[in-house]
Image (tube, rainbow, N blue to C red):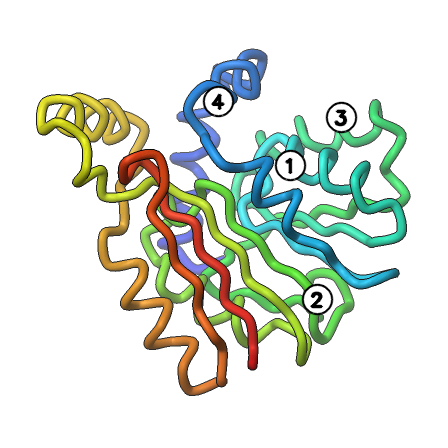
Amino acid sequence: MPSSSLSNATAMDSMYGWQIGIYDFTRKYYLLGRDTLINELEPPPSGTVLEIGCGTGRNLIQAAKKYPTARFYGLDVSQVMLDEARASILKSGLADRIHLALGDAGSLNTEALFGLKKVDRIFCSYTLSMIPQWTDVLAHALQSLEKNGVLSIVDFGAMNEMPKWIKFVLSTWLKTFSVFARPDLESVLKNLAEPSKFDVDFKSRFRGYAYYAKAKRH
């Protein structure tokens, strides 16, 4: 991986290594909209689904249970997270349908990582706000989709509909984890999607707490 990616990987391992035992329990209270995204993935029969920034594997396990004929793949820059994900996936009995790889989403190559030229669904759940090169992630994700593929995103929003003091407290707290909302996510995604003939559906939810977006080729 490039030096910037290695630096980010080291930071992620250091930041989340001590939280592994409580990570999923604590995140369920503020990573809003993840299950909605999973429920709307609807991959084709025997389709392929990739999660960018799969963390502990929680989302992949949920999705694999909901779509039993699909194949699932997870990518993360943190070895600590992947170790936890592999253990959870093995425990769930889904190791034959969920495959993981260590890598940099900013230079995503699904064929090199998983032997897949293209995939049917890609999703990012509260990960773009943690990746410095997030615009590169979007570009590579769109390029990695099949003809009728869909990119789904849920992440922290600009929180502009919230009282200013709440926005300040939440933003300050998230920064302690190197998490930064991407207020220009909608415009960047639409600019990247247009040349490849993707339609973008972009919504702000929970009074601006979260963005929910889909890019689907028309």
**Given the image, on which type of amino acid does mark 4 rest?**
Arg
- Answer with left or right where residue 151 lies relative to residue 130: right
Q: For the residue labelled by badge 3, is the local secondary structure a helix, a strand or a loop?
A: helix
Percent position (x, y) of residue 46? Answer: 87, 61
Q: For the residue labelled by badge 1, is the local secondary structure a helix, a strand or a loop?
A: helix
Q: Residue at x 58, y 12 (%)?
A: 21
Q: For the residue labelled by badge 4, is the local secondary structure a helix, a strand or a loop?
A: helix
Per the image, the residue denoted by label 4 is 27
Comes first in the chain, label 2 or label 1:
1
Percent position (x, y) of residue 171? Answer: 20, 30
Per the image, the residue denoted by label 2 is 120
Q: Which mark is residue 59?
A: 1
Distance between mark 2 and mark 1 Cα atoms = 17 Å
User: Given this view, does label 3 or label 1 mark the residue nearer the observer?
Assistant: 1
- Answer with left or right where residue 112 lies relative to residue 130: right
Comes first in the chain, label 4 or label 1:
4
Per the image, the residue denoted by label 3 is 87
Distance between mark 4 and mark 1 Cα atoms = 12 Å
Q: Are marks 4 and 1 in contact (CB under 8 Å)?
A: no
Distance between mark 2 and mark 4 Cα atoms = 27 Å
